[in-house]
Amino acid sequence: MRNVLITGGSRGIGAACVRKFAAAGDRVIFLYRSSEEAAAKLAHETGAMGLKCDVADKKAVEALFSQFSVSVDVLINNAGIAGFSLFQDLSEEDWSRMMETHLGGTFRCTKGVLPAMIAKQKGCIINLSSMWGQVGASCEVAYSAAKAGIIGLTKALAKEVGPSGIRVNCVAPGVIETDMNAALTPETVAALAEETPLGRIGTPEEIAETVFWLASDNASFLTGQVIAPNGGLVI
Ligand code: NDP
């Protein structure tokens, strides 16, 4: 039985990952920021353990890992936020929050699990990027920059910890039906679906399948890669 830690597990892609890994018999712990009710419901449904921890908060993550007795086999850095605005309207606060959540959260949680993985000479880290981290999105400069940073972090860390038996990969989804896209108008979603070669947007379960496969021994020779379940929108 693997110990799997998933950040941002209360909703969307993270929740689909919690369900997928828990159903496979893994011991799953997930973090969330504020959705207590959703987290409690998911924990009850799956048997996973939900812990409230804001990954953008250095002290909160340090406190979490200082009490953590579980050695994590699989870390999924999934917690994320969206932000839409003209670059000119981006504030320092917007920028910092985006960087602290995506890059800071990934940095901190990875630091928290690595010592035990190195000691075991085995481990798997999967970071959620986005197709916008690959090609950039207008009015999402901070998000695109953070997600591009996740790709750089993944590649560099894969080189550094590969000799310790640890695989580090990235999943860069296309447009997925979650709360993150709730602000998009139906017309925008329809236009994105039409632009997508497979003719639709994706589901959180499809991303969880990719993540699950990457964490399995079936992907044992894969590290430092960006796997892009995006329906062909970015090729
Ligand atoms: P959702 O908005 O549906 O869910 C976000 C999850 O992250 C929630 O569980 C939320 O917790 C958690 N979260 C947010 N900020 C923090 C934080 N600071 N600390 C801890 N948990 C936090 O997002 P998605 O499921 O759509 O996205 C998941 C990941 O996939 C993100 O990294 C996103 O950027 C990426 N992605 C999503 C795409 C999409 O189209 N949906 C496309 C490409 C990438 P809470 O419920 O408590 O707020």
Image (tube, rainbow, N blue to C red):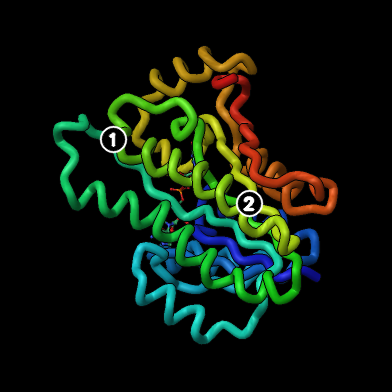
The answer to whether mark 2 is within 8 Å of ligand 1 is no
Q: Which quadrant would residue 117 be assigned to in this image?
A: bottom right
Q: Position of residue 16 (x, y in %)?
A: 62, 51
- Tell me whether circle 2 and circle 1 mark residues in contact (CB < 8 Å): no
Work out whether 51 lies above or below 179.
below
Q: Which quadrant would residue 68 be assigned to in this image?
A: bottom right
**Whether residue 42 is visible:** yes
- Give the camera-side residue of 4 and 226: 226
Looking at the rendered structure, the kind of residue marked 2 is Ala
Q: Is residue 83 left or right of residue 43?
A: left
At 70% from the left and 46% from the top, the residue drawn is: 223
Looking at the rendered structure, the kind of residue marked 1 is Phe
Q: Secondary structure at mark 1?
A: loop
Label placed on residue 84:
1
Numbered disc in front, either 2 or 1: 2
Q: Mark 1 or mark 2, which is nearer the start of the sequence? A: 1
> Which image quadrant: the N terminus?
bottom right
Q: Is residue 45 left or right of residue 190?
A: right
At 67% from the left and 38% from the top, the residue drawn is: 206
Callout 1: few (<14), some (14-19), or many (20+) C-alpha neighbours within 10 Å? some
Q: Which residue is mark 2?
A: 158
Q: Position of residue 181 (x, y in %)?
A: 42, 36
Work out whether 154 lies above or below 203.
below
At 63% from the left and 32% from the top, the residue drawn is: 229
Q: Is residue 80 left or right of residue 164?
A: left
Q: Secondary structure at mark 2?
A: helix
Residues under labels 2 and 1: Cα distance?
A: 31 Å
- Give the camera-side residue of 116 and 14: 116
Label placed on residue 195:
none
